[in-house]
Amino acid sequence: WKPNAVGLLETAFLNANKFGLLGAGSELPNLCLGGTVSCSQVLNGPWSMAFGVPLTIPGMLAYATVIMLALVPFLASDQRDGTGESGVSPIEEWSQNGLAGLTLSMAVFSGYLISVLAFKIKAACGWCFVSASCSLFLAGFTWNRRLPLPTVKVGLSSGAMAVLGAGVIFATTSTQVAIADAQTYLATGGAQMELQAPPAITTHSSDRVMKLVKYLEKSDAKMYGAFWCSHCYDQKQTLGAEAMRSIPYIECAKDGANSQRKLCQEKDIPGYPTWEIDGKYHPGEQTLDELEELVGLKAKAATPLTTELP
């Protein structure tokens, strides 16, 4: 039951992060591959809730319940005498029915969430894929054996209820999103929603950085990022305001100011920030030494990179 443990720990971590139990300002690691939406946006957006409840909460409870149902027959061994309708003891039959129904429901709902991710949000969230994979594995493990007919009936009934529940949640959330969009449209008088610019850079560039900039310009260097990306901001702070005025910065977020989302998608940018230097892509925040190495400039003795703007 390792996948169940992984699913339980993952959903517990996501809930702890959502409710600030990991400390103020704790940032969720971004496992969103490609696209222009962060995992934080996916996991905190309108599609991550159902009737005001974060979906990670019932997800965590479902994984915990699977563990309980699997352990009940062993913990209640004194009640395993006799057989029920399916040829096993009543406690085992109860556990078997519960596992069949719950794991199939989890798989159905995971399919719904992945469909929303693909067709509505249009993002690839690694956290979501891990949880969905765990749910599908549990359902496959439970159903890939000969189950008594009563257990099959219970499981299929639960799966049908999960399909109905997913449909209700989809319809409700779609309505809420449409109403929110309409309210925004009316509030702005039909004008386009204000785009968001990255935070202001508060550091000056050192002589060392400005020398590096000349080599970056010769290498046709570009930096791809998103306004909400903290690592992108840290990269800009490392280089300083003067340097960033000379380095082309490409905004990949759909709702970012001067967004070039289509270009980012065409180039299949793997994450933020990503540097393009001499036509090659280097994902991740780079140190000054690493950038100097990428452009063929031998690093000098360490000097202050930036100074705070007054």
Image: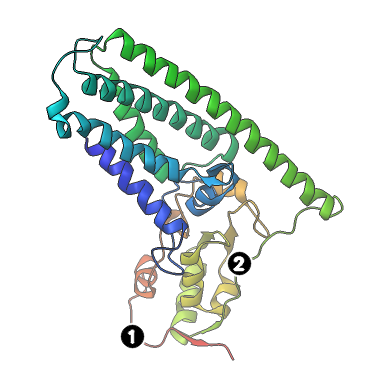
Question: Quick one: which residue is furthest to the right in this view?
Answer: 189
Which residue is under mark 1? 302
| Quadrant of the snapshot with the C terminus | bottom right
Looking at the image, which residue is at 37% across and 74% down?
A: 297
Near mark 1 (Cα within 10 A), the count class, few <14, some 14-19 or many ≥20, is: few
Amino acid type, label 1: Ala
Residue 10, percent from left and from top: 34, 47
111 or 37: nearer the viewer: 111
Image quadrant of residue 187?
bottom right
User: Going 48% across and 42% down the picture, which residue do you hit?
Assistant: 55
Looking at marks 2 and 1 on the same chain, the residue that comes earlier in the sequence is marked by 2
Q: From the viewer's perspective, is residue 143 above or below residue 12?
A: above
User: Relative to the observer, which residue lies in front, 136 or 238?
Assistant: 136
Q: Nearer the viewer, residue 144 or 248?
A: 144
Determine if residue 220 is in view. Answer: no
Quarter of image, res 151: top left
- From where the camera sits, is residue 145 visible? yes
Query: Which amino acid, mark 2?
Result: Pro
Quadrant in the picture for the N terminus: top left
Q: Is residue 3 above or below residue 230?
A: above
> Is 169 placed left or right of 60 in the picture?
right
CA separation in Å, label 2 and label 1: 28 Å
- The secondary structure type at the circle numbered 1 is loop
Q: What element carries label 2?
A: loop
Q: Position of residue 279 (x, y in %)?
A: 46, 54
Q: Position of residue 103 (x, y in %)?
A: 35, 27
Residue 200 circle label: none
Q: Contact (CB < 8 A) between labels 2 and 1?
A: no
Q: Position of residue 217 (x, y in %)?
A: 52, 68
Which residue is labeled 2 in the image?
198
| For residue 79, above or below residue 20 | above
